[in-house]
Image (spheres, helix red, strand yellow):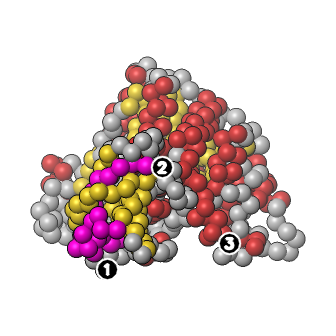
Amino acid sequence: MQVKEILLQKPDGQDIVAKGWVRTKRGQANIVFININDGSTISNIQAVVEDGVISEDILKKITTGACIAVTGKLVASAGAGQSVEIIASEIEVYGIADETFPMQPKKHSLEFLREKAHLRFRTNTFGAIFRIRHALAFAVHKYYNDNGFFYLHTPIITASDAEGAGEMFRVSTFEANKAPLAEDGSIDYTQDFFGRETSLTVSGQLEGELGALALSKIYTFGPTFRAENSNTTRHLAEFWMIEPEVAFYELEDNMNLAEDFVKYVIKYALENCADDLAFLEKRLLEEEKSKPQNDRSELSLLDKLKFVVENDFERITYTEAVEILIRSKPAQKKQFQYEVAWGIDLQSEHERYLVEKHFKKPVILTNYPKDIKAFYMKQDDDNGAAPGPTVRAMDVLFPGIGEIIGGSQREDNYEKLLKRVEEVGIDPENIWWYLETRKFGSAPHSGFGLGFERLVLFVTGMGNIRDVIPFPRAPKTAEF
Ligand code: 4AD
Ligand code: MG
């Protein structure tokens, strides 16, 4: 029985076996208390060893980190902090852990734990994070399944650069260190992936659109890869993305879907991960106490999550956002490191100002300048107050995170799309299959991508994206 289940049993003195890893062992004159955790829940089960029941030889082997099985009777606990405990009659030691075991019962820094990535799963913090990550992934599938979407598996190895940003990892069939070179010294790509130039996907969107223009409502949920060398707390080289794509949706429908979906998964975590969230909230409160007063967050983790679930996201255009940012500038003072002007790609300092200082809630920014967005976005016929051409793009910005979602209505007009493809320098031959969907039964459609780790970052309140994925891939981190 898992510890989670044992803790829910009636303490009727029935025989029970608990297996797990020792978190602490405390001894008194003639009684020993051992706390065991098996990862099924944040809580431990306590085993009580009365004098003389277990041999000294075995007790000596039971130290923090050891793996054991305790057999005994389940009784109501007299001590504070737990309702049941096991009166041990037998203990089997599966594996000892000597004093070099790094996860001793004290607070370790996250930097230290990142260096011990193979063992950090055994801590309360990472146990909580990865259980929440699981719950969020399950909620994603549940949401889309319940709303009539089909889970479409798009390729990991692909010949197209969906975002056109040139940040792809090449895939090849070359033998290690023996890339065949052409006469001019460049790599001979005719020998790349069975004669074709391919990379790891940056997004399943283009393939997802093929599915949506037949099945109407699809979503992808898979690993994506970006060879951007950004050493930040928000970027990974390998991250998971959820990309719904829907036929007959315009930008407005897309925004409604994004808001409803994000609120649903956060609510799911609030309802199903209460213990883990309470643990992380407490941890965060302690961390906040060590910060200077005005750097402390105003809301606790749970209040922040509830606030997002219960309030409407603010929806404004890029042009309006730029006006707000320009107006916010105090006289004679530099407000931002990067100056704001219509046409710039908003930096994270600008996004954070809008979300954290101005609106104090999630914001959906729409109708961006065409030149700073991907080729596939639908062009606005009416630019509103914008001084230049815009596209039906939308970015969802979250407090403490910045961009959590990027999406758009897609260009469905063949001529306009082809012109845009040529303008940005993509060879139409390379995406002929994508262009053909606009020749045969084209339809208005929209979609977006949610960075899964950025969602987990928000829900867990952690500060670094490398702490919310089991095996982070970022510059200088790939031990296994
Ligand atoms: O804004 P992006 O680049 O959009 C796309 O890839 C579109 N094809 C999505 C679509 O319309 N179907 O990426 C989408 C989201 C971002 O908002 C961000 O949350 C996340 O993916 N993201 C990253 N997360 C972690 N590390 C990185 N390097 C990321 N790059 C993007
Ligand atoms: Mg984006």
Is the residue indicated by label 1 positioned so its CB lies within 8 Å of ligand 1? no
Residue at 75% in and 53% down: 360
Residue at 79% in and 60% down: 326
Q: Quadrant of the C terminus?
A: bottom left
What residue did someone put label 1 on? 99
Asked if one can make out residue 401 in the rendered structure from this viewpoint, the answer is no
Q: Is residue 358 above or below residue 363?
A: below
Q: Nearer the viewer, residue 197 or 476?
A: 476
Disc nearer the start of the sequence (1/3) = 1
Q: Which mark is residue 250?
A: none
What residue did someone put label 2 on? 76
Residue at 46% in and 67% down: 230
Where in the figure is residue 248, as x and y percent of width and height? 54, 23
Hey, which quadrant is residue 313 in on the image? Answer: top right
Cα gap from disc 1 to disc 3, whole angstroms:
31 Å
Q: Circle 2 — which element?
A: strand
Residue 73 shown in magenta: yes
Which range of residues does the magenta coloring cover? 51-75
Q: Nearer the viewer, residue 67 or 139?
A: 67
Looking at the image, which residue sits at the far top?
441
Q: Is residue 303 left or right of residue 5?
A: right
